Amino acid sequence: MKNLIGIDKTKAEELSSKLNQLLADYQVFYQNLRGLHWNIKGKEFFELHLKFEELYNDAVIKIDEIAERILTLEAEPFHTFSDYLNNSKIKEEKSVTNGIEGVKIVVKNFSTIIILEREILNLAGNADDEGTISLMSDYISQTEKTLWMLNSYLQ
């Protein structure tokens, strides 16, 4: 049985489940980024304050795109904080003011996200789901570059 966009319904359900996990990860990551942006202190304040804002602005776009992809696959995106916290592999961060510690948190969060993005890419390939493949390919390329840059900052 196929859904409206021609994807096997069972595969679409599996993809939607993984996309909901990614949505939860991005929501917690987004809030972590907001906290880092607001609370960062020290000599790296100006550059990291702007970088964290850039990253959370990007995350909010991805959150919307992921939710809309879940809807396209005929499933319901998570939309409560309890769903996000119960399903995210990313943990909440609180009261982080040190810039280097903040960047390390972002690297750790992105490292968690990219593993799931690759898993979703593989599932989408098996489902012949070009829309999700394209989305994950773009995200993976962006995440890889961001991880490289943040890791270079930490060196």
Image (cartoon, grey):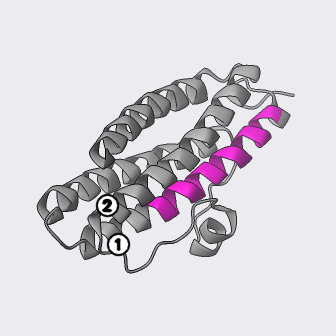
| Coordinates of residue 35 in the picture (x, y in percent) | 35, 72
Residue 13 included in the magenta stretch of the image:
yes
Give neighbour class at mark 2: few <14, some 14-19, many 20+ (Cα, 10 Å). Answer: some
Q: Quick one: SS at disc 2? A: helix
Instruction: Return the mark for residue 100.
Output: 2
Closer to the camera in the image, 80 or 57: 57
User: Amino acid under label 2?
Assistant: Ile
Q: Is residue 7 above or below residue 25?
A: above
Q: Which residues are magenta?
A: 11-29
Looking at the image, residue 84 sits to the left or right of residue 61; the answer is: right
| Coordinates of residue 28 in the picture (x, y in percent) | 51, 64
Task: Give the residue at the far bottom of this rendering.
Answer: 95
- Residue in view at x 31 percent, y 44 percent: 155
Q: Quick one: SS at disc 1? A: helix
- According to the image, label 1 marks what residue? 35
Closer to the camera in the image, 89 or 77: 89
Indicate which label's residue lies in the foreground, 1 or 2: 2
Give neighbour class at mark 1: few <14, some 14-19, many 20+ (Cα, 10 Å). Answer: some
| Coordinates of residue 82 in the picture (x, y in percent) | 63, 75
- Residue in view at x 72 percent, y 23 percent: 6
- Residue in view at x 59 percent, y 71 percent: 80
Looking at the image, residue 39 sits to the left or right of residue 31; the answer is: left
